[in-house]
Amino acid sequence: MAIHFLAERRLLDTQISKFLYSRLVFLISEGNKRCLRVMTLAMSIFAIDGDGRPTPKQWRNLVLALQTFNLPGWTVTLEGRGDSTRVEVYRPKSC
């Protein structure tokens, strides 16, 4: 099981994509779909506390990582703009 996740993670290009993958695997059960605020993901991926906000560069890199998240079977859809941006993610069942 863990080997499948490591192999899937190795397919990703950037470090942010790999952090994002780890967070999504933690948050979404196999075969399920979940809608998340991108701000919430940014705060957890970049370890931002309390009232802190991601820098514009961090925000752009995270949105780019979400837009280019292309693992087989995964579906990622961005909706909205700015702080209200949401992402809907479907995680497939592993073989």
Image: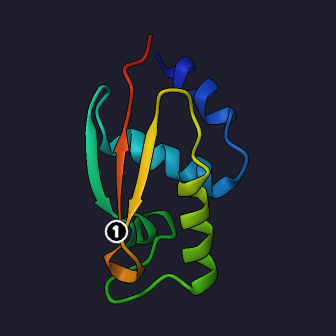
Q: Nearer the viewer, residue 82 or 57?
A: 82
Is disc 1 placed on a helix, strand or loop? helix
Q: Position of residue 28 (x, y in %)?
A: 31, 40
Relative to 50, 71 lies left or right: right
Inspect the image, locate mark 1, and give the three-letter code of the amino acid beneath it. Thr
Q: Residue at x 60, y 57 (%)?
A: 65
Label 1 belongs to which residue? 40
Q: Residue at x 46, y 70 (%)?
A: 47
| Vertical position of residue 3 compared to residue 46: above or below | above
Question: Could you tell me which quadrant the C terminus lies in?
Answer: top left
Q: Quadrant of residue 11?
A: top right
What residue is shown at x 44% (from left), y 47% (from top)? 76
Classify residue 53 as left or right of residue 56.
left
Q: Position of residue 68 (x, y in %)?
A: 61, 51
Q: Residues within 10 Å of mark 1 (few under 14, many from 20)?
A: few
Q: Picture quarter containing residue 61?
A: bottom right
Near-viewer residue (80 or 84): 80
Please indicate whether residue 13 sits to the left or right of residue 76 in the image: right
- Does 51 sit above or below residue 64? below
Percent coordinates x, y for residue 66 in the rendering: 53, 56
User: In this view of the protein, which residue sits in the foreground, 56 or 25?
Assistant: 56
